[in-house]
Image (spheres, helix red, strand yellow):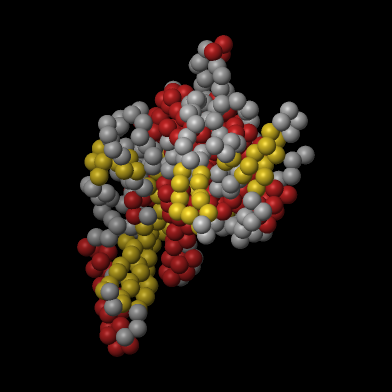
Amino acid sequence: MTHCTPKPLRFSSLNGKKIQSSFTGGDISSDGGLLLLREVDKKLGLTKKFSKAFNDQRHQGYISHSVHDLLKQRVYALSAGYEDVNDHDFLRNDLCFQIAVGREVNLASGSTLSRFENAVDRRTLVEINQLLVEHFIDNQKVAPTEITLDFDPTDHQIYGKQENRHYHGYYREQCFLPLHVFCGDYLLVSMLRPSNIDGSKYAGAILRLLTKRFKQAWPNVKITFRGDCAFGRKRLLHWMDNNIEYVTGLAGNARLQANAKDLLRKAESQFKESGKDQRLFTEFAYAAGTWKSSRRVIVKVEKNINGTNQRFIVTNRKDGTPQAIYDEQYCLRGDMENGIKQMKLDLYADRNSCQLFLANQLRVLLSAIAFALIAELKRTHLNTTQFAKAYCKTIRLKLFKIGVIILKNTRRIQFLFSSNHPHQAEFIAAINSLAPP
């Protein structure tokens, strides 16, 4: 790209000295920490595995950028905070990005990356989700005795004329309704769905596939399903009753509220007498009209100065007190919700601005791959530092967004970081952990 020589930018003076600047510094980058992500990716081979899922139908004689390079370029940019392909019309010239991707020439332009996204097929998307599951299995050095699968839908607000766009009455907007599945800090599934469906749509099929695969890998593993009231559906509950344990929310209705009436009165009475916040639990057997049998329902009632609150959950667990199941099992799903926030707010999984639905599904999965890379960096190479549990955005701001001067000749490429970078100790610790052979 040809640039004309810019005029110096003038700022207010300091102690009688002029302050001038211009964008003529040469090979200086604000994303020096991408070298860290590059080393994690090389050690895991994660983007290389995912790139093999793509069905590349381009004429090989005209290709300048491999699928693997395109995937790395897109995933690394998301990790660094560049959410759309338009950014790459400039990033492609950034020497730091070029080296991170593994090239010493210009990277793909925004239009090339757009064609890459829009050429994806359904089989590729399925295989990428399968590879996320296999990544989780491969990383378990010891067969787990039990695992908990967290399912949760969320909304991706959209603008324009995207394929499969619909208005959602609850969110009051045009949106998609993706479904995410986590196991601890591992993201297993990110499935983009239209919003004109029930919130539990496809959850049963995904759960059956995951259960089958995990039972193949670990025959004796105990699997627990956890979700909100969107998943309290008769067919899903019936299948889980015969296969796995579950702790899931249950939408309130007149019968449930009637059964919890005495507990609510007790909470209100005790709050009135003591003036202290009340949080009480009970349980009872309950059978909805469409259920074949009754199930164990736990209710939590809260009373404080702001009013009252009731929550119902249903479970097939026989052990545990109502409060223990609620606090030590159900409430832990909040960690998964934090993962979804990172996907949307930090890695732009909701940047679904392509016209084609499959291309938007790929964008969600590109964010999922970025999430997996950063999670591995935290889990394995920052586990002794203050960033072991940090959000993706924190990792980006503290460790990826590092100004660097790049010096390149025929024998060596040098990255000169600031001597005063406040988190160089953590950066050095991670690099030493990743020390290349």
Judge whether 304 appears above or below 136 on screen. Answer: below
Could you say which is closer to the camera, residue 159 or residue 192?
159
- Identify the residue at image location x=62%, y=44%: 404
Residue 334: x and y in percent read 44, 59
Residue 126: x and y in percent read 48, 31
Q: Classify residue 174 as left or right of residue 242.
A: left
Judge whether 350 appears above or below 277 on screen. Answer: above
Residue 251: x and y in percent read 29, 57
- Identify the residue at image location x=65%, y=48%: 417
Camera sees residue 314: yes
Could you say which is closer to the camera, residue 294 or residue 234?
234
Could you say which is closer to the camera, residue 293 or residue 388?
388
Camera sees residue 211: no
Q: How many numbered discs?
A: 0
Residue 167: x and y in percent read 23, 41
Could you say which is closer to the camera, residue 377 or residue 326?
377
Q: Classify residue 372 as left or right of residue 352.
A: right
- Identify the residue at image location x=43%, y=65%: 326
Q: Classify residue 348 as left or right of residue 372.
A: left
Quadrant of the snapshot with the C terminus: top right
- Identify the residue at image location x=51%, y=44%: 21
Farthest-out residue, front: 16
Farthest-out residue, bottom: 273
